């Protein structure tokens, strides 16, 4: 299983939890860490380059801290550029047979996302999942790290999730 870990963090330089997770992911020989904030500092996503990476992957994972109940703007740009290219080209079947999942870090406690404010975490992530499901991928439930603290991360569980 080859895992493509697509990471986005608007404030990557200041990240603690996501940097620690990314470092743990680099210990796994089956993971390709792909930090789009480092690669696309100009904000211009290269769809062909991204599609080439997707072709090689069995499991595609988005990793990001949840900001304002969604992804960072660059990850949304990735979705707009890459998924649109996939759907309107000869690549339209590229996601079939692949798995897709989300790793997200959250500043709030788990009960903050239990729905009592209107939506659960799974409901907030549903548009992302549906985009991949619509494109033919099999979706795996999210791996969420609540009250994210870099000094106390569930690194083994995270590594297990990246196996798909």
Image (cartoon, rainbow, N blue to C red):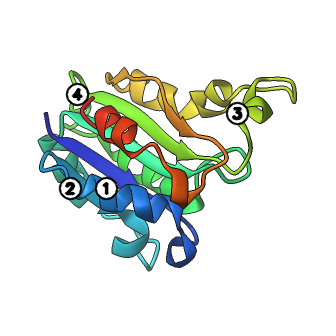
Q: Nearer the viewer, mark 2 or mark 4?
A: 2
Residue 40: horizontal and vertical position, in percent? 38, 73
- Dot 3 falls on a residue whose secondary structure is helix
Residue 114: horizontal and vertical position, in percent? 75, 24
- The residue drawn where x is 13% and y is 33% is 1
Q: Residue furthest front?
A: 152
Q: Which residue is mark 4?
A: 93
Q: Which residue is mark 3?
A: 110
Q: Which residue is mark 1?
A: 24
Binning the other alpha carbons within 10 Å of mark 3 as few (below 14), some (14 to 19) or many (20 upward) gives: some
* C-beta proximity under 8 Å, tags 3 and 4: no
Return the mark for residue 32: none
Q: Nearer the viewer, mark 1 or mark 4?
A: 1
Binning the other alpha carbons within 10 Å of mark 2 as few (below 14), some (14 to 19) or many (20 upward) gives: few
Q: Nearer the viewer, residue 51 or 103?
A: 103
Residue 141: horizontal and vertical position, in percent? 46, 23
Q: Which residue is mark 2?
A: 27
How many angstroms separate mark 2 from mark 3 (CA)?
28 Å
- Dot 1 falls on a residue whose secondary structure is helix
How many angstroms separate mark 1 from mark 3 (CA)?
23 Å
């Amino acid at each position: 299983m080859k895992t493509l870990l697509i990471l986005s963090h608007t404030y990557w330089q200041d990240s603690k939890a996501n940097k620690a997770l990314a470092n743990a992911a680099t210990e796994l020989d089956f993971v390709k860490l792909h930090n789009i904030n480092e690669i696309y500092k100009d904000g211009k996503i290269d769809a062909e380059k991204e599609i080439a990476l997707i072709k090689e992957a069995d499991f595609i994972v988005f990793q990001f801290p949840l900001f304002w109940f969604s992804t960072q703007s660059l990850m949304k740009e990735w979705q707009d550029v890459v998924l649109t290219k996939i759907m309107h080209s000869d690549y339209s079947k590229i996601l079939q047979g692949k798995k897709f999942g989300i790793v997200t870090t959250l500043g709030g406690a788990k009960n903050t996302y239990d729905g009592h404010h209107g939506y659960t975490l799974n409901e907030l992530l549903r548009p992302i999942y549906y985009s991949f499901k619509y494109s033919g991928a099999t979706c795996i439930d999210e791996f969420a790290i609540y009250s994210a603290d870099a000094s106390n991360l569930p690194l083994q569980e995270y590594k297990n999730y990246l196996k798909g």
